[in-house]
Image (cartoon, grey):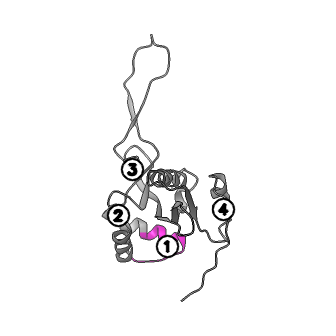
Amino acid sequence: MSTPSKLRTATPTGTRSAPQTKRVAVREPVQVRSPAPSDLGALTELLEQLGYPCTEEQVEARLAALTSPGQPLVLVADLWLGTRQKVVAGLLAMELGCYFHRDVRHAHVTALVADRRYRHRGVARALIAEAQAIARRANCQVMHLRTNRSRDDAHSFYRALGFEETHLTFDKPL
């Protein structure tokens, strides 16, 4: 998982005989990490954008219930807007498990949202990539997710990442 302190160094272009210029530290535009207590407001706003309004207290309780030691199940994406300005621009939550009916471990993405102000900047793609890495380390063989039928842009995005439509899901309120 990338951390906000991880920097890559831009190297000067030109020939080897050109005078060396000072190296400039360039941050990756999107960095994925585990959530921090200071993220509660941003995560609450992101869940509202996804269509699930809640309070910061509810988000805090959910984080406490979902996060297991050594296995982050909630990820946050920071987007660097400048050299010193970053915003929480996305979140992903997932559950790891195994099927009863076959010997396959799976990762289930339960929430994925990129802030509407920062879409098409690689936020969701970075979150999915990190979630896949975590799932592989947990010996999962498949990742799946549910998405509302009305989210056509999301469907195209998931297909572009290699997800295939495989099941029809039924919900019944209890």
Where residue 26 appears, as percent x and y from the top left, is 42, 37
Q: Which residue is mark 1?
A: 48
Q: CA distance from mark 3 to mark 2?
A: 30 Å
Give the class, few, some or many, for how many residues have Cα within 10 Å of label 4's Cα (few <14, many ≥20).
some
Spot the residue most to the top: 17
Q: Which residue is mark 4?
A: 155
- In the image, 168 versus 105, the foreground residue is 105
Q: Amino acid under label 3?
A: Gln
Mark earlier in primary sequence (4, 1) = 1
Which numbered tag is attached to residue 85? 3
* Residue contact at pointers 2 and 1, CB within 8 angstroms: no
Where residue 79 appears, as percent x and y from the top left, is 45, 51
Q: Amino acid under label 4?
A: His
- In the image, 48 versus 104, the foreground residue is 104
Tell me the SS state at disc 2: loop
Mark earlier in primary sequence (2, 1) = 1
* Circle 3 or circle 2, nearest the eye: 2
